[in-house]
Amino acid sequence: MNRALTTLAFGASLFASLAGSAHAAPEVSLARFECGTPQEPQAVNPRFSDTYSYGDLKLQFVYSCYLIKHGDEYMLWDTGHAMTMPKVAPKVSLVDLLAKIDLKPDQIKYVGISHYHADHTGQIASFPKATLLIGAREWDAISAPKPAEGVNFKPFESWIKGESKVEPQTLDKDVFGDGTVMLLRTPGHTPGHSSLLVKLPQMGPVILSGDAVHFRENYDSDGVPSFNYDRAQTVASIERIKKIASNLKATLIIQHDARDIEKLPVFPAFAK
Ligand SMILES: [Zn+2]
C-alpha cells in the first residue's frame, strides 16, 4: 500500500470510529406504573361525550404513570393520584415503586405533567429535585393567585415558591435534545395539555396520550368529553396524534384505558 492509500485508509477508519461514537445514542426504555385504584366500570355518556356518542357503553378507567430511562437519566410522566385520595388512591406510592428498582426520588431529573387534574399530579410533591416540564398554560393556571376549580395546584407548592425548577413550554419540547423523548402540545382537554412521544429502539415510537383521549372509542370517533376546556382544540389535537401515529407508525397508549395496559410489560420490566 502506498503512503497516500495508507493515509486514506487510516483516515477512513478514524472517521468511522468517530461517527460510531457520535451515533451511540443513550438507550431509551419505558415502564408503566399503576397510579390509582380502578373503580367499577362507569357509563361514559354524557361525561365523556358532548355528542352522546356511546349509548350504554360502560368502561373501567385505570390510572397510569410512566418512567422513562434515557441512558443514566430518568423522567417521570404524570404522577397519578395522591396517596390520600379517597377510594382511588394508589395501592403503592411512586416512591415505593421506584425503590423496587433501587431508584431514589432525587434521581428523577424531569417530571413531565400532561395536565393539572388531580389524577395526573397527585404525587409530584415527592420529587422536588426534579425539573417540572409542563405546558405554559397549565403552569399559568397552577401558579395563578387564585387557581380555578379543578386545578390541583397544592402539590406544586415547591415549584410555585421557586424552590424547585419549572420549565413551562409553549411549543413541543425535545426533552433530552436527541429527539427520543418529545413533549407534544395537545391542548383542548385543558388549555396547556401535553402528550408524550417516546422513541423506543425495539418497540418503536410510543405516544402516551395524557387525557387528549380517555378511551379507544373516544379516539376512533374524535369524541370530546363534555367537561373539556375547548372542543375545537380537542379535535385538532386528536387529529394531530392520529397523523403522528400514522407517519411514525407509532403505538398510541391511552393512559386511562384498561385495554392499553398490556401494550407495555408489567413493571419492573421495561419496554425497549
Ligand atoms: Zn385523567
Image (tube, rainbow, N blue to C red):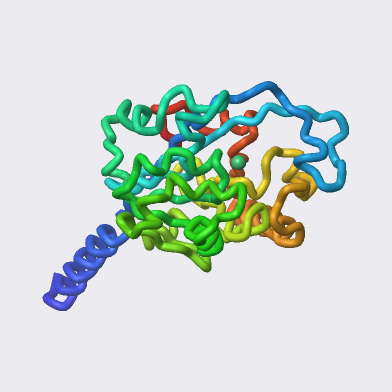
Q: Residue at x 55, y 26 (%)?
A: 86
Compared with residue 204, is residue 37 higher up or lower down, i.e. above or below?
above
Q: Residue at x 42, y 50 (%)?
A: 156
Q: Quadrant of residue 61?
A: top right
Q: In the orientation shown, which residue stands out farthest toward the left?
A: 3
The picture places residue 109, in percent across and down from the top left corner, at: 32, 50
Q: In the orientation shown, which residue stands out farthest toward the bottom?
A: 4
Q: Nearer the viewer, residue 270 or 168?
A: 168
The picture places residue 207, in percent across and down from the top left corner, at: 56, 48
Q: Quadrant of the C terminus?
A: top left
Residue 27 can be seen in this image: no
Q: Nearer the viewer, residue 196 or 52?
A: 52
The picture places residue 82, in percent across and down from the top left corner, at: 47, 34
Instruction: Say whether residue 219 is left or right of residue 137.
Output: right
Residue 77 can be seen in this image: yes
Q: How many marks?
A: 0
Q: Residue at x 24, y 67 (%)?
A: 15
Q: Nearer the viewer, residue 141 or 247?
A: 141
The picture places residue 237, in percent across and down from the top left corner, at: 67, 58
Q: Residue at x 43, y 55 (%)?
A: 180
Instruction: Say whether residue 126 is left or right of residue 137.
Output: left
Q: Quadrant of the N terminus?
A: bottom left
Q: Nearer the viewer, residue 264 or 157?
A: 157
Compared with residue 196, is residue 173 higher up or lower down, i.e. above or below?
below
In which quadrant of this rendering is ligand 1 seen?
A: top right
